[in-house]
Amino acid sequence: MEEIMNALNGYRTVSIVEVWVRVLLAAVFGLFLGLERYRKGKPMDFRAFVIVAVVSCVVAIMAQEVYADYADSEGTIRLDFMRIIEGVLTGIGFLGAGAILRRGDDHVVGTATGASIWAAGGIGLALGFGFYLLSAISFITIFATLLLFGLLMQDREDTRTEA
């Protein structure tokens, strides 16, 4: 049992409690972004938002831990946080692109959903690296944008479907 507890608490950069806080916040933020899109019948399931935010958070925590594990090694390992961030956001970008659909010559749908899934990944990364305030401000801004400006877009969509 002691070995299991040591393995669970074996993080160098964050405590297990901190890991839980970061991952759960990523899940909550991703859930709210996803539910907003889901409620409007958009093309991506809200669960995908949670998964993307949580995995992005986990990748960020993992990057910190790997760096801490090998920080003392003499040039055998090179870890670049920016490449990890770029890789995660590029991969999520492909997922978001799948949500964007073209209907007719002048009608494209899913751009906000594609951007939102990408944002969920960015928020997850920020949480994973421990930037709570940045994550909260980003979440509030994005969520408010989806809700408030979504009301304006609803009028536009109603007009477009009538034409």
Image: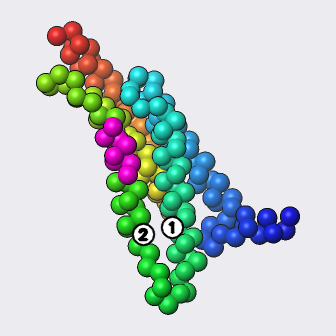
| Magenta-colored segment: predominant secondary structure | helix
Magenta residues, start to end: 91-98
Q: Residue at x 46, y 56 (%)?
A: 125
Q: CA distance from mark 2 to mark 1?
A: 7 Å
Kindly identify which numbered label has been placed on residue 63.
1
Indicate whether residue 94 is drawn in magenta. Answer: yes
Q: Which residue is mark 2?
A: 81
Q: Secondary structure at mark 2?
A: helix
Residue 142 appears in the picture as rendered: no
Screen quadrant of the N terminus: bottom right
Q: Residues within 10 Å of mark 2 (few under 14, many from 20)?
A: few
- Res 157 → quadrant: top left
Residue 122 appears in the picture as rendered: yes
Q: Residue at x 55, y 80 (%)?
A: 70
Q: Residue furthest bottom?
A: 74
Kindly identify which numbered label has been placed on residue 53.
none
Indicate whether residue 36 is drawn in magenta. Answer: no
Q: Position of residue 76 (x, y in %)?
A: 48, 85
Q: Secondary structure at mark 1?
A: helix
Tags 2 and 1 touching, CB below 8 Å: yes
Q: Position of residue 30 (x, y in %)?
A: 50, 41
Q: How is the image coloured?
A: rainbow
Q: As displayed, is residue 28 above or below residue 38?
A: below
